[in-house]
Image (cartoon, coloured by chain):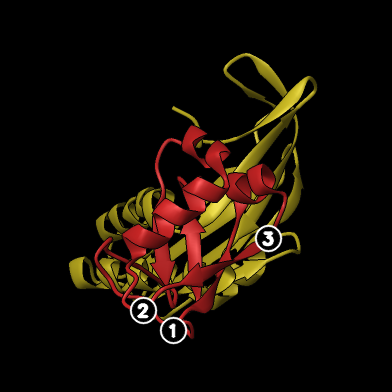
Amino acid sequence: MNTQISVLLFGITRDLTGQSAVTLPLTEGARVSDLLESIHAQFPDLARIRSMMVAVNGEYAEPDLALSSSDEVALIPPVSGG
Amino acid sequence: MVSITSDPIDVSSALTLLQSDQAGAIDFFLGMVRDNTQQRSVDHLEYEAYDRMAISEMRKIVEQAREQWTILKCVVVHRKGTLRVGEIAVLIGVSTPHRADSFDACRYIIDTIKQTVPIWKKEVFTDGETWVNAHP
């Protein structure tokens, strides 16, 4: 069964996509790396960013972490606080 | 105490929070908005935060500092939104029994914030704008 997952966008990812969140289809057993692949396919401009992390439920996530539609997911482009 | 605010950062209220009868030292680090970057003239900065995660990452950093140094009290405040030249973007305050721990903990906290906390800075120049660190 296909469900959907919402991804929060900040900083340059929000500027490049023109959106503060995107909804993507989520296939059963999809992992963080699969999500990154499909978001890059939908928004090729994101490849211009130096590096990209993903946060799941407010924590940095490894590429092999499995996702569920209830997760809060965010793209984390290179940080520049301070 | 760790927080993110859209309002100007008040150093004197942070000082009040840090005071302790056991403290022999209080150190502050203030990150300021500078009027230039690499010879380009800065008009203002835009800071954006993933608030929930930024707070939890900053709390982790404070805990890591507490494991390394004897810290009595610690205040971390990061600003977000539009900041003008001369404003405070971030305040780190640490009180400790002895000064060496204050200096070291303060430096560790600001250096680590810059590496891991999901806050983003856009520099708006008089002739363009850029998200800092975003491009190769």
Residue placed under numbered mark 1 in the picture: A1
Q: Colour of chain B?
A: yellow
* Secondary structure beneath label 3: loop
Residues at circles 2 and 1 in contact by the CB criterion of under 8 Å: yes
The residue closer to the viewer here, A54 or B54, is A54
Residue A43 drawn above or below residue B58: above
Q: Residue at (41%, 48%) from the top-left corner?
A: A52
Q: Quadrant of the N terminus of chain A?
A: bottom left
Residue placed under numbered mark 2 in the picture: A28
Compute the Cα span from label 2 to label 1.
7 Å
Q: Residue at (70%, 56%) from the top-left corner?
A: A19
Residue B109 location in percent, x, y?
37, 57
Same chain, labels 2 and 3: yes
Residue A43 location in percent, x, y?
57, 45
Image check: B82 left or right of A80? right
* Secondary structure beneath label 2: loop
- Can you tell which chain is drawn red? A
Chain bearing tag 1 is A
Nearer to us: label 2 or label 1: 1
Compute the Cα span from label 2 to label 3.
25 Å
Asked whether the viewer can see residue B113, the reply is no
Q: Which mark is residue B32?
A: none
Q: Amino acid at mark 3?
A: Ser
